[in-house]
Amino acid sequence: RMLEVVLRSCQERARLLQQSAFLQQQTIMDDLTTAFNRRHLDNYLEEELERDRRYGRTFSILFFDLDRLKDVNDRYGHLAGSRVLREVATLIQGKLRKSDRIFRYGGDEFVVTLPETGADGALRVAHRLRRAVRSHRFLGAEGLAVTLTASFGIATFPQDGSSQEEMIRVADQAMYRVKDKTRDGVGTREGPG
């Protein structure tokens, strides 16, 4: 009888721990994609920049969004656009190192963090990810083969900023300069990369 009570208690504790882990995961994941969410980005960047300041390491972020996703939404509907966002997050995640992370910033904007990566390395990664998006055929499960491109902006700590706000602002502005000129490119603080 006592063994039964102990077993039930252990099972209930295991169930509660599993439920707690699931809820904790939900608080850092974006609801739509497989990417982390913006709230987690803020916490992560604060910790990463503090670590990089302390140890004198470099760190880069990529800010990117999809070019003309509105055309997909207009032509195939918003559910198709949402599926594209999930596909993009999965595609990009599959091209990153384990230490790199992808975050959904909002809408069709994403941030990729690249620990211990300088400006040259970030530029190479951004071009590799840009080519991956351009060559991917989206919505294949729906019998479609939608092609898209993405515009990227890069910021590297410490030269492009010492706070998360500065880093995101520099990378965002670099991305928008690409979008204003050509799309399907990579921008840095100095210009096209």
Image (cartoon, grey):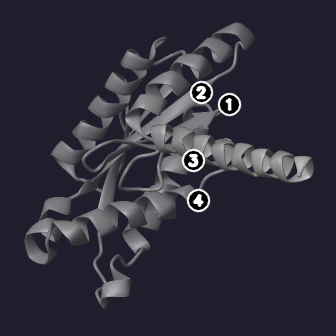
Cα separation between marks 4 and 3: 26 Å
Q: Residues within 10 Å of mark 1 (few under 14, many from 20)?
A: some
Pick whichever, 5 or 20, lies toward us. 5
Looking at the image, can residue 68 be seen? no
Q: Residue at x 22, y 69 (%)?
A: 79
Residue type at mark 4? Lys
Where residue 59 is drawn, which disc sits there? 2
How crowded pointer 2 is (Cα within 10 Å; few <14, some 14-19, many 20+) is rated as many
In the rendered view, would you say 131 is above or below 174? Answer: below
Cα separation, mark 2 vs mark 3, equals 30 Å
Does residue 158 lie above or below 26 as drawn? Answer: above
Looking at the picture, which amino acid does disc 1 mark? Answer: Glu
**Mark on residue 161?**
none
**Residue annotated with mark 3:** 22
Residue 116's label in the rendered image is 1
Residue that badge 4 annotates:
95
Looking at numbered disc 2 in the image, what kind of residue is underneath it? Answer: Phe
Say if mark 1 contacts mark 4, CB within 8 Å: no
> In the image, which is nearer the foreground, mark 2 or mark 3?
3
134 to the left or right of 177: right
Q: Residue at x 88, y 52 (%)?
A: 1
Q: In the rendered structure, are the residues bearing label 4 and label 3 in contact, judged by CB atoms less than 8 Å apart?
A: no
